[in-house]
Amino acid sequence: MRPSAAKKFWIETWGCQMNELDTQRMAGQLMQSGMLPTRDVQDADVILLNSCSVREKAENKVFSQLGRYRRFKSDNPDLVIGLCGCVAQQVGETALDRNPDLDFVLGPARVGELGRILDRRRSGERVVATGFPEERHFDIDTISRAGSYKGMVTVIEGCDKNCTFCIVPLTRGPERCRPLEEIVIEVEHLVDYGFLEIELLGQTVNHWRQPGGQWDFADLLDRVARIHGVERLRFVTSYPRDFTPRMVEQFARHPNICPYLHLPVQSGSDRVLKRMGRGYTVGEFGDLVEQLRKARPALALSTDLIVGFPGETEADFQDTVALVEDVGFASIFAFKYSPRPGTAAVHLPDPIDDGTASRRLQELLELQVRIQRNLNEQLVGSEMEVLVTGWAEATQLQSGRTACHRIVHFPAKPTAQPLGSMAPVVIEKANPHSLLARLQ
Ligand code: SAH
Ligand code: F3S
């Protein structure tokens, strides 16, 4: 087929790495059916909105994009628009009722069915594919990895935790683990394909267990870290309570496990953690951090924090401030609490007004900028390896990530480094959110 005759697709992605990977899966299926990606949404024959529903703001964004894109149908009556991702699972059929220009709704557990759903649309049906079928297909042979410099591998889907604020268990369904053998085959394929960095994915990735077997996430880490060619191994997201001493040990045992860990704490107050249903205390979190840093002294930690959770007093918030100062996170993702339909926290008393929540968020972010500037300044003069992922024409700077997940910019001199390769650099200057370096 000549490229100019091929149908084009456009996928817009919000949210977490699992959504990013789902986008790669959908792109792969479309390309296998002969379609090509486009960089111009107006040129697309299929538009997919891969949505996130973790906070209300993210949910609103997808519907405003839908409002924009449906106008393209007047120029291209054959245009097909699909709502995918967590909002799709959450709103299901009502989205079709409310949006006459929406062609189908596809939940995260049904991504593998995209091709069939498009066929059904062509024969006139407006499909709602949501829910969590018993048989789920991991379509590893149709994932489009183009434009990606790390190989993401799902090891566990869904979530069985009941954090009272979180909608994810409702949108991504119950937890399901993939067998170790299947994960190893996929990682070997990705290394063979040329990826230097592998990232294992799951909402609670360290809760992985071999289906019907004895192995846990420590065994999986140990096995994957030994695969020849895995230069960098990351995993996201770890649940603090599920981290065992054997998992901590792997950081000491395998230098290719990156010195970086995302460990969401959510709050620095035991009272709030209890109301969130997190199942650990601030003290236990601190002990875990200590163990991890003993195993890997250079470990960079990042975390998620929620401010303005119902009933959060000023003293609770100051406990969070104190925790952030004590731990010294390399980065934080802090959010104002957003009530989500169907979650337990919407029934909690004592909501926090938006002004207070905004002030708390601001205070936390300002503190974090100071911490990051400080931590990053200590890196000036050090030699690091950067996985090169970007190139900016305007500034003539290349960019990438260190093993500790910091963003580095460096001039492409004397020669530009290929995207996806590892470049040795020396850090010359520190900003709060990035480092400037030169090639070694
Ligand atoms: N385990 C998941 C968590 C998904 S939600 C993961 O892989 O990252 C990501 C983060 O969003 C959570 O850690 C939490 O800090 C935040 N979040 C979740 N629900 C929220 C809500 N209702 N309001 C504000 N922030 C929320
Ligand atoms: Fe959400 Fe808690 Fe699971 S934050 S994804 S319910 S671990």
Image (tube, rainbow, N blue to C red):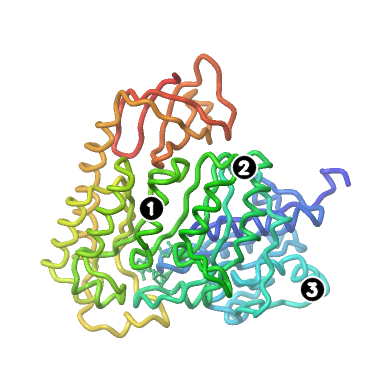
Q: Given this view, does label 1 or label 3 mark the residue nearer the observer? A: 1
- Quickly name the residue at label 2: 147
Q: Which mark is residue 120?
A: 3
Instruction: Confirm or deny contact between disc 3 and disc 2 (CB under 8 A).
Output: no
Instruction: Determine whether the residue tagged by mark 3 lies in a helix, strand or loop.
Output: helix
Position of residue 76 measured from the top left corner of the image (x, y, whole percent): 74, 59
Query: On the picture, is 375 further left or further right than 318?
Result: right
Closer-to-camera residue (329/86): 329
**Which is more N-terminal, label 2 or label 3?**
3
Q: Which mark is residue 249?
A: 1
Residue that lies at the very extreme toward the left in this rendered image: 315
Residue that lies at the very extreme toward the top in this rendered image: 414
| Residue type at the position of mark 2 | Gly
Closer-to-camera residue (410/218): 218
Instruction: Determine whether the residue tagged by mark 2 lies in a helix, strand or loop.
Output: loop
Q: Ligand 1: give its quadrant.
A: bottom left
